[in-house]
Amino acid sequence: MTFWLNVVLATPAHSALAGPLTYKSDTEIAPGTLLRVPLGKREVLAVAWENLPDSGGLPEDKARQISAVLEGLSPLNTSWRKLTSFTAAYYQRSPGEVALAALPPQLRELSTLQLARRLKRKTADTSSTDSSADLPELSPQQASVLADFQADTRPALLFGATGSGKTEVYLRAAARVLALDPDAQVLVMVPEINLTPQLQSRFEARFAHLGRERVVALHSGLTPAQRLKNWLAAHSGQARLILGTRMAVLASMPRLRLIVVDEEHDPSYKQQEGARYSARDLAIYRARLEAEYAGSDQTACRVLLGSATPSLESWQACKVGRYQRLDMAERIGSTATAAPSDQTKANAGLPTVRGVDMNHQPKRCVIAPPLLEAIVQRIARGEQSLIFLNRRGYAPVLACHDCGWKSECPHCSAYRVFHKIDRSLRCHHCGFAERVPHACPACGNLDIAPVGRGTERLEEHLAELLAGVTRPDGGPVRIARIDADTTRLKGALEAQLAGVHAGQVDVLVGTQMIAKGHDFRHITLVAAINPDSSLFSSDFRASERLFSLLMQAAGRAGRDAKHSAASQMWVQTFYPTHPLFGALKNHDYPAFAEQLLEERQAASMPPFAYSALLRADAKTQEIAQGFLTAAIKAAIDQQLPGHAQVTAYPAVPLTIQRVANQERAQMLLESDSRVALQRFLAAWQPLLFETRRQAEFKSLTRWAIDVDPIAI
Ligand SMILES: Nc1ncnc2c1ncn2[C@@H]1O[C@H](COP(=O)(O)OP(=O)(O)OP(=O)(O)O)[C@@H](O)[C@H]1O
Ligand SMILES: [Zn+2]
C-alpha cells in the first residue's frame, strides 16, 4: 500500500520550493516524524507534516519515496508543529526553514545508524529526593510575588528592581512546577548565556538533586555534539530544565509547563536573520499553545517575564490587564521599608544617582575631577568601581589634522576603529582590518591622531590618572577591561569575571557586557562616561534602550546590602536637564515609561501600532530603493487585502547606508491593526518574488521582511 504525505525541509522562503513537498511511503507515517528524503540528487532531513488522502495530482513518475525514518525519535508533537507554522507565517518565512533551523544542525549530518548509536547512550538515573540544598529564606516581597503568580493564569511580568532577587523567584517557580509533575519541563531563557555563567551554575546547583543531565543548556556557543545531545534530552523529556538563549523557544519540549524570560526587554531576544522572530513574543504564544494541547487545564503552561526595565510592549500589556504585573521594588537586604524617610524608601537600596554637568568641567576632560575623586576614595576603601563606555577599541576614528583624512572603511559608510594593541584599523561592520599606516595615506603627513575614545583608550587614560594612587595594602591600582576584544578566547570572559568577583580588580572598564545581569558584590560605584550619543538617535527606541542600559549599569553598584547606602551611579552628560536623567535619578521606570507611552500613543507608534520593515541590499541605492518602491506600487495597484489599513513610508537608506559594499535601504510599513498588517504581508509575498524577477532588479543582492522590528 502507498501512503502519501507532505513533508517540510530546509528550503528558504525565497525559493520556489517554499511550501511543503509531497512524498510517498510504504508505511504510514505519523506527522512530526523525522525523515530523510531525496531532494534532487541529495538526501536531506525532513519533518513529516501531514498525511494526505492521495497524491494530490502529483504524476506517479514525479512522486518520490522517502528514504528513511529516523528510528528511535518520537515525532515532534502537535504544539511544536503549530508553533513552527505560526512562526513561519507570522514572520513571513517558510515552515520548512523555521522547522529545520529549530533542529540541531548535527541531526542533518548523522546517518540513521550513527543517530541510533547516540540514542542508545542512556544516562543512569542519579536523582535523589534530597532537594534540601540550603534554600535562602524568601524575602516578604519574593514570597508575596510567588503567591500572586500562583493565583493567576495570565502571562506575568515580574517588575523587579536590580538586585531584588528575581532569580530566586524563577528558581522557586521552576521548582514548584517540577515537583508537582514528575515529567514537567521548564524553559528558562536568558539574553546571552555566555555573559552569565553565574546564573547557569545557580540553576545547576539548585536542581542537582534531579540527577545528572536533567538541567541542560541550549545556545549557539555549544559544540554541535553538545547541542544535539542537549536537544535530544529536551525532546525525549529527560531534561527537566532547559536554560537557553532565544533559539531555545523553538526547541522540542513535550511537557513544557513554565517559560521564564529573564531580562525580557533585552534586544537579543529578537533574531536578526532568517525568520526574524521575537523569542519573548513566541514564549507567550507557545505557552498558550502548550496549555491548549495539555487538555482541560488551561493554566498548564505559564509564562513569567522578568525585568527591572520592562519593554514598553510588556508594560502596556500589564496596563490593559493582558499580563499580570508582579512588583519587587526593593533590593534584597534593603532596610528601606523600615526607614522613616520617603526618599530612602523610594530608592529601596538602589545607588544614589549623581549627574555631572560636563559643560562645567575642564575642557576636554574625560573623567570629571569630582568623579575621579570618588573613584580614588573607593580604591582607598578597598571597594570596586565600574566605568562604563559603550564603545570598544582605542578610538572610533583616526584622523589627519593637515588634510582632514579620516579612517573610513573602503567597503562601508563608517569609520574604521583604531585598535592600539595590535595597531590595526578595524571596521566593526564588515570586519575589514589593516595595519595602521605610518603616515596619512592622503597627504603623507606623519601626524595622524586618534579622535574620540573607546574602552581601550579609557583604560590607558585611567592608568595615567591613577598612577600615583595606592591601594590600602600599598600596592598599585589594578585596572581591568572587559569587552568583546578582551574576551575573544574561549573561557576568557569567565576568567576575567571570576577575577572581579574574587576582588582582584579595583577599577573595571567595559562595554555593556559588564553592565547587565552580573551579581557583583564589591562594586560600589558605577560611572557612565559618555552616554549622550544615544539621546538624539533617529531610532525612536534609542532612549528606551539607553534608559534601560543605564538602569542596568546602576544595578551593578551596591548589591551587597552593607554597601548599598553609600553606593553611587555617576552619569557624565552635556544635557543634565534631559528628562531621561531625571527619571534615572529617581529610579523611576514607571514615570519614564508613562512619558514614552504618551509620546508613542500620540504618534501612533508601537506598542500602539504594528510595524514591519522591508529591507533590500544592492550594489546601488537606486536599485535597492527602486525595488522597495516598485514592490509597494505593485501592492497598491493590485489593491492587496489589508492595504487600505497599512501606511507605507518612502524607501530610505539605512543609517549606516553601505556595509561590505552593499547599499542598504528599507521601507517602513505601519498599521493600527496587526491582523491587517499580517494579511497584507502574506498577500505581498508572491508580489515581492515577482518584482525581484524583473530585469531591472536582477542584480538585487537580497531582500527580507522584518516583522515587529526593534531597530529602525
Ligand atoms: N531570599 C533571599 N535571601 C538572601 N539572599 C537572596 C535572596 N534572594 C536573592 N538573594 C541574593 O540577592 C542577590 C541579588 O539577586 P538576583 O541576582 O536574583 O537579583 P536580580 O533581581 O536578578 O537583579 P538583576 O536585575 O540586577 O540581575 C543575589 O546575590 C542573590 O543570591
Ligand atoms: Zn567595513
Image: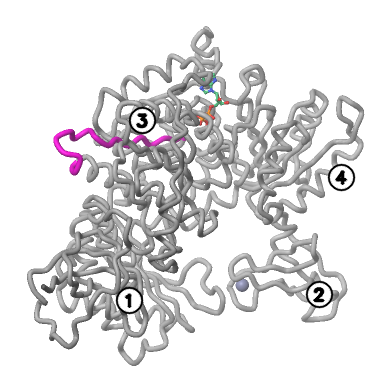
Q: Is tag 3's residue or tag 4's residue first in the polypeptide sequence?
A: 3
Q: Which residue: 21% across, 63% down? A: 49
Q: Is residue 221 left or right of residue 646?
A: right
Asked if residue 267 shows in the view, the reply is no
Q: Earlier in the sequence, mark 1 or mark 3?
A: 1
Q: Please name the residue shown 41% across and 38% down the image.
A: 241
Q: Could you tell me the amino acid type at mark 2?
A: Pro
Q: Is mark 3 within 8 Å of ligand 1?
A: no
Query: Please, is residue 564 above or below residue 546 in the view?
Result: above
Front: mark 4 or 1: 1
State which region is magenta. 292-308
Task: Let me know if residue 294 is in the magenta part.
Answer: yes
Q: Nearer the viewer, residue 87 or 187?
A: 187
Q: Nearer the viewer, mark 1 or mark 3?
A: 3
Instruction: Decide if ligand 2 comes within 8 Å of the CB at mark 2.
Output: no
Q: Which mark is residue 14?
A: 1
Residue 437 image label: 2
Of labels 4 and 1, earlier in sequence is 1
Q: Does label 4 or label 2 sit earlier along the sequence? A: 2
Between marks 1 and 2, how big is the CA–CA gap?
A: 43 Å
Question: Circle 4 sits on which residue?
Answer: 464
